[in-house]
């Protein structure tokens, strides 16, 4: 869905049938948007608009999450001038959720009655 919003194309047509962490390598699910598919940010920037992205970014292949890059599939490499958010690793999110649940399991929160 993110690929469709950014490119205006069907996600399978740009090789991103699902989030990059679940890419299979089969046609339509390569795990990254090719440079031949312009993003709306690139088109807007070419026409004089400023671009800014916010939130989690599931469009970078997991092999490019390191500080050494490559950065061409990071938000600034896909047409955005500024970005405030984070690149997401499914494992990191799942691990954080497990830690949160261990720290505060369901049912441990007290209900406060306003009466």
Image: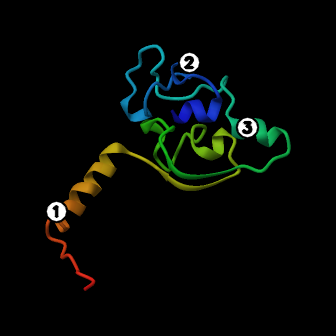
Question: Is residue 33 shown above or below 47?
Answer: above
| SS category of the residue bearing label 1 | loop
Question: Is residue 1 shown above or below 81?
Answer: above
Measure how far apart labels 2 and 3 are at the Cα level: 18 Å
| SS category of the residue bearing label 3 | helix
Q: Within the image, what quadrant is residue 48 found in? A: top right
Residue to which mark 3 is pinned: 42
Q: Which mark is residue 106?
A: 1
Question: Left or right: 56 with respect to 5?
Answer: left
Q: Position of residue 70 (x, y in %)?
A: 55, 39
Residue to which mark 2 is pinned: 13
Task: Report crowding for label 2: few under 14, some 14 to 19, many 20 or more residues within 10 A (C-alpha).
Answer: some
| SS category of the residue bearing label 2 | helix
Q: Position of residue 66 (x, y in %)?
A: 46, 47
- Name the front one of labels 2 and 3: 2
Question: Is residue 105 shown above or below 11?
Answer: below
Q: Which is nearer the eye, 69 or 115?
A: 115
Task: Report crowding for label 3: few under 14, some 14 to 19, many 20 or more residues within 10 A (C-alpha).
Answer: many
């Amino acid at each position: 869905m993110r690929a469709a919003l950014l490119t205006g194309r069907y996600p399978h047509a740009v090789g991103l049938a699902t989030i990059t962490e679940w890419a299979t390598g089969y046609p339509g699910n390569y795990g990254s948007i090719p440079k031949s598919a312009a993003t709306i940010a690139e088109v807007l920037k070419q026409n004089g608009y400023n671009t800014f992205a916010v939130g989690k970014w599931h469009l970078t292949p997991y092999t490019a999450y390191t500080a050494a890059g490559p950065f061409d599939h990071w938000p600034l490499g896909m047409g955005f001038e500024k970005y405030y958010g984070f690149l997401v690793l499914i494992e990191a999110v799942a691990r954080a959720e497990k830690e949160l649940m261990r720290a505060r399991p369901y049912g441990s929160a007290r209900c406060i009655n306003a009466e």
